[in-house]
Image: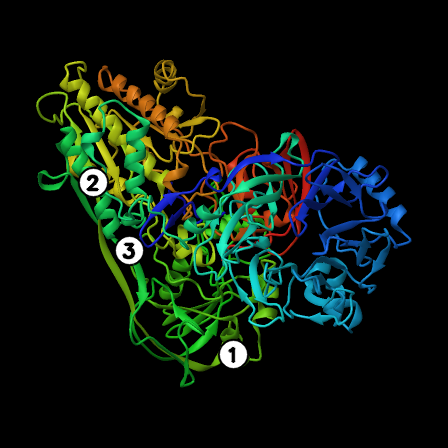
Amino acid sequence: MFFLTTMRLLAFLFLSTAVFAQTEADFITAPRQLTFEGKRSGEGYFNADGTKMIFQSEREEGNPFYQIYLMDLETGDQERISPGMGKTTCAWIHPDGKRVLFASTHIDPESKKLQAAEYEERKNSKVRRYSWDYDEHYDIWEYSLVDKSLKNLTHTRGYDAEGDYSPDGKKIVFASNRQAYETKLSKEDEERLKIDKQYFMEIYTADADGSNVKRLTDAPGYDGGPFFSADGKLICWRRFTPKGDVAEVWTMNADGSEQKPITKLGAMSWAPYFHPSGEYLIFTTNLQGFANFELYIVDAAGKHDPVRVTTTDGFDGLPVFSPDGKKLSWTSGRGAGGASQIYLADWDHDHALTALGLKTDPQAVITKTPEPDFAATAAEIRPEDMKQQVTYLASDALGGRLTGTEGEKLATQYVADVFQKIGLSPFGDDDTYFDNFEFTAGVALGEGNELKFNGNDLKVDEDWKPLSFSQNGEVKPAGIVFAGYGIETPEEATGNDGKKIETYSSYAHLDVKDKWVLVFRYLPEGITQERRNELSRYSSLRYKALTARQKGARGLIVVSGPNSKVVQQLAPLSFDASLANSGIAAISITDALGDKLLATAGKNLKDLQDKLDNGDLMGGIDCKGTLAANIVIQQEKKKGRNVLGVLPYGDKPDPHVAPLIVCAHVDHLGSSGGSNSRAKGDEVNKIHHGADDNASGTSAVLEIAQWLADLKKQGKLTLKRDIIFAAWSGEELGLLGSNHFVEAYAKMIKGDPNAKLTGMFAACLNMDMIGRFQKTLVMQGLGSSSIWAKEIEKRNAPIGLPITTQNDAHLPTDSTAFYLKGIPSLNAFTGSHADYHMPSDTADKIDYVNAAKIAKLMGLIARGIATTDPAPDYIAMEAPKNQGVRTGLRAYLGTIPDYAQGDIKGVKLSGVSPIGPAAKAGVKAGDVIIKLGGKDITNIYDYTYVMGDLKIGKETTISVQREGKEVQMKITPGSRD
């Protein structure tokens, strides 16, 4: 679906000679739950011959914390190893089988009080998030299985834990933040230690008796969870970024040398463990979403993409292999109730090698994806036919189908070929199936961009960058004046209520003729949302450029300012809808350069922005010095094409009877997702396959066309109007293809591209993302015609799909292009998901059975409209209150709304960005936001509106409904820029 700026997963692995889809059953078989007792269990590790397992469990009466237990896997006998008091974690059995190590706080004199306090907090807390506290009293202890004695191996203040023996039993490796307690910290680090003890965690080794301690890592952020490889030569561990929001898997030599990352997923990847072969590691990651941890494997060199192992609902993590590499043990919440327990399964080592590209699978399918064989499809709507079509459209061969690319040409040619084979008549340009349109694909810096301050060269893309709408050409040296936020409201400007607004002018008594005007990038940060709404239409960079130009300025200089807290100080070189230049030179500069310009007048950005951010005005400032520029921006023009075919009610198309439109968009984000991608880091540059969005909808159009054409051919369908089948392109870039079609049609029929087309088309039936059926099908746009409720009721009777309806027809998809022209529209949608606008939206995840049912439902509705007089009536609706108020909205929370929520009060979330403010606050997928910043939220528009009140970096509250209870959390908004 088309959204302008709204966890990653690799479900297909493409080898040099083969490609195949992975399932959990390919890797593990005969999975079974090993532990059942207690609140939770986890971190089970085998002994040297695989006959015993040591693990931690919350099952000791009178103690809410983990204790350590040893299980005989041959008899099932168990014994508690730890003292039973305090907290324990991370145990390991020595290779000789006579001793074990574990971390424990049992000698902390406050242990009993802490246990009682924990029980009390659990009893009184409505919602309790599981967390780890990195207690400074943790030490690593050795327990003798022979004489039952305990020996402290570390006895050092700080968290000493996460330890294990080397394969030869001579060394231990562990994690510790002891250095934070042993060395003098800066004041900043002293404060950090109070709230973020894990930041100081590093990896250490020692002799097996605890002597000869050696520190191996020295990087900001949490280094932890180390394990030796089976040959003892390597150590794997997890390394968090300093912010603690991303972790990757790393390896190093046992002496600490040659440290290198093995994963680069940009998610929370942790708990790595070597396979005994040494060829690959298994690890845990939340690539699928903040709280959705799954197991993945990656080759030991990190040269291949990681491959997903588990797909069952519930937490999956902390994996370990048996010493022979034939079994996998891990901690999972997949059981009844979702409590974490230890699971055991058989492991397919050969398949793992094949999946990682370390071994060729002779049975794998050849990489080149062939075009679907039309002869193999049936006239009726079938899941297997849809699978064939979606697999091709979402294949690597089509490169993500970005409008204007070779991938789009391949996709549209395929649709046109199917239309021809079905027997549809061409309805495009020059008696073809293609409806061509030109668009601006982007802007780029040309050769020769220069900027000089007082004759000194400044670096483009480092100190400054042209704005996309800047006038090209040379700008002679000119003086510089500072004009605040660069906003001026007209004398008679009114608000949404029609009342005159308070005048605002950054140019009072300021002469800017033939000078550069330096202005802040946004709106004053401290003004109310009401005032923000009043000023927002005058605050866009284009409007600021217009204002400066009208006052005779030679150029516009935009600076973000320190209070704006942007991620990228230079405004991105991205094109907007008009692409016309502003008639004035316009550039973006860094705060550092802005301070340099103002320093000539004895001023700085911070002081000036502080004064302006409360909404007050101030006089302009003349800066000393001159600025000269040469600006070269190139616009890239490309062509896209829709595919149009018509099933006429007679022998040939009849323009005198309003036709029905059945459509879907065929384009997606391409091989590099660009600004619309939700991916992060290197993932952005991977193919965005777009299986659900929207190969699924395109496939449904093909299936419906084939089914209805066959019925007509057999004489079983008597049409009373033509049916136009359309595959739109450019939807992801802003409904380009569908808008082009309706505007060209309006101009042809009425001489005005903006004219209404009521009565010119019977209706528009659109399908956008129908492949990921979850609990319900969402039918959107019911309010656009009185016929829709009755039609859905009748046509769904033989299908039996659970359906949620939404009245609003102002949707972020192609049906809106028709509705805004006065045509009743209906859109089918199965909801957003974690793979939306990610490379991981792949064909193997499509629910083809339900997708076929949805196609059949829409086909029956199309059949009903096309065989009935009169056409559906059109009902005009206002866009929902607060829709479109995002102008000036800069706060970012990282929430992913569930647009299939129906009429639930609040905003239901289908997910959260794994490293966004919402995830850090504890917000989860499935939560329904009911309050934000103390204000009630009843719908997505309220939510967007209230977002405008949030201040970047200032903590506020968010309340959600979760499992029938209201949960309030603290959240600190970030910047979306």
The answer to whether residue 693 of the structure is visible from this angle is: no
| Res 857 quadrant in image | top left
Return the disc, 3 or 2, that comes first in the chain's sequence. Answer: 2
Camera-near label (3 vs 2) is 2
Q: Earlier in the sequence, mark 3 or mark 1?
A: 3
Question: Horizontally, is 298 left or right of 98 in the view?
Answer: left
The residue depicted at 44 percent of the width and 61 percent of the height is 303
Going by the image, does 480 lie left or right of 819? right
- Which three-letter amino acid code belongs to the residue tagged 3? Ala
Left or right of residue 86: residue 463: left
Secondary structure of the residue carrying tag 1 is helix
- Up/down of 176 relative to 430, above or below: below
Work out whether mark 2 precedes mark 1 in sequence or the reverse, and give the earlier one.
Answer: 2
The colour scheme used to paint the residues is: rainbow
**Three-letter amino acid code at the position of disc 1:** Lys
Give the number of the disc on residue 441.
3
Quickly name the residue at label 2: 414
Q: Find the residue positioned furthest to the right.
A: 109
Q: Say which amino acid is labelled 2.
A: Tyr
Residue 494 appearing in the image: yes
Most foreground residue, 621 or 593? 593
Q: CA distance from mark 3 to mark 2?
A: 23 Å
Q: Which residue is mark 1?
A: 596
In front of the other: label 3 or label 1?
3
Q: Residue at x 64, y 29 (%)?
A: 336
Whole-percent x, y for residue 316 in the image: 59, 42
Residue 973 x %, y %: 59, 52
The crowd level at tag 1 (other Cα within 10 Å; few <14, some 14-19, many 20+) is some
The kind of secondary structure element at disc 2 is helix
* On screen, residue 152 above or below 398: below
Front residue of 461/818: it is 461
